Image: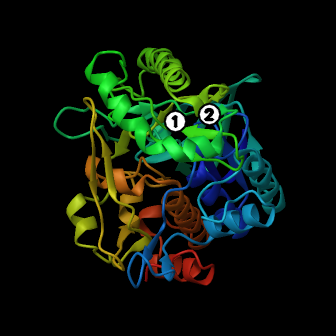
Amino acid sequence: MTHYDLIVAGGGFSGVGAALAAARNGLKVLLIERGNCLGGAAAVGLINPFMPYWTPLNGKNDSSRKKLSAGIFKEISDNLAKAGALASNDMTFDEEYLKLLLNRMMKQAGVNLLYHSYVTDAEINDGKINFITVANKSGNTKFTADYYIDSTGDGDVATICGFPFMLGREKDGLSQPMTLCFRLAGVDREGFNNIRPSINPLYKEFREQGKIKNIREDVLIFNTMKDDILHFNSTRIVKKNPVDAFDITDAEIDAREQVHELVAFLKDNFECFKNAHLIMTAPQIGVRESRKIEGEYLLTADDLKECIKFDDAIAAGNYDIDIHNPEGSGTFHYYFPDGEYYTIPYRSLIPKGSKNLLTAGRCISATHEAQASIRIIPIVCCIGEAAGTAVAVAFKNKTELKSADINEIQEILRKNGAFLGI
């Protein structure tokens, strides 16, 4: 069996942050990804733009702001900007260049990549993973490592290893809705800008008349890097289990119907969309929430609202608690005061009882409400960077991850400009 210092499962932003941080600290790293590229939700889920990752310091009209997600995420953003692949709002990006950029960053850091691969099994004794089994075109292959990071989003590795988890919200297990994003080209942008305020009132009217089956309350539209192309995050699939293969299949099928329903609605009712055409749907449906591991600390909405600064904090954020109704229409928001932010404790990355496994990304130990804020791309990238840094510290000191020196972890994150929330 091939041995690595660290194996990271999942090549989204949290996995990218973890793999780069560990490799740059001298570890031999393998990054396993089920798709054909890095970037996770941003690449295969077509999730764009980045959500706000800063807090205003002197009011919303003041240009001064404190960025809360930096480090490797800032490096990625800066490189996108240099290539003309990031809009001036620091949020809208070109995901095709992102895929190329992340490949290059991994190659430069010496990270070993393995695409089109799934972790399907593991041998674990007394909380320590001895090896994992990976399935791909080569068959089933076993790999060993000193440490592992689960950045699959769904907590797949932790689940395979038998560590406890929560699914969806606490009262009924329902997760936030899944969404299939899509894009329209050939849009008359000047015309669109003029009629944009009239889209949602007509959409609501059509929904009330039964002409629209989509249960989402509005049509959510974003600009892209191209003038004639608009991005839509407007489908809504509820009451489906995002970690059940049959439910995911049904969700993809139902969401595609919603896409074409929305396209027809726009083309039939607004002149600016008359010549528009559907150019793409995301390669896979976007999942906001699924499994969340039971960790050494459960991060709660109260922790976030009280803006607690944990002693073992490893990342910060203040994105609103953004909960899309798991049962139907409506979206709940709790917004944080300007200049305030919360932190995320290292303990929430450690599955209960694990010795050499961390989780990173939206599957860390958090309640349904808390996860609704920490799940955005900039924050999970910072969580991943912290996880990779923690592994590097544990590897150097030959300790279990639970015993990794938090002061040393935080110092490295500060040195690398990765943790601006302290």
Task: Give how far across and how far down residue 182 sits, in percent.
Answer: 58, 32
Q: Position of residue 68 (x, y in %)?
A: 48, 73
Rendered-image quadrant of the N terminus: top right
Crowdedness of circle 1 by 10 Å Cα count: few (<14), some, many (20+)? some
User: Quick one: which residue is furthest to the left in this view?
Assistant: 171
Q: Residue at x 24, y 40 (%)?
A: 169
**Residue 3 in picture, x, y percent from top left:** 71, 47
**Mark 2 element type:** strand
Element type at mark 1 = strand
Q: Which residue is mark 2?
A: 183
The dot on residue 123 is 1
For label 2, count other residues whose C-alpha is less than 10 Å away and answer few (under 14), some (14-19) or many (20+). many
For the point 58% across and 37% down, the residue is 45
Nearest to viewer (mark 2 / mark 1): 2
Q: Is residue 9 placed above or below 63 in the rendered structure? A: above
Q: How many numbered marks, from 0 up?
A: 2
Of 94 and 241, the residue lying toward us: 94
Q: Earlier in the sequence, mark 2 or mark 1?
A: 1
Which amino acid is tagged 2?
Arg
Mark 1: amino acid: Glu
Q: Is residue 352 visible?
A: no
Residue 400: give x, y in percent of width and height.
Answer: 47, 62
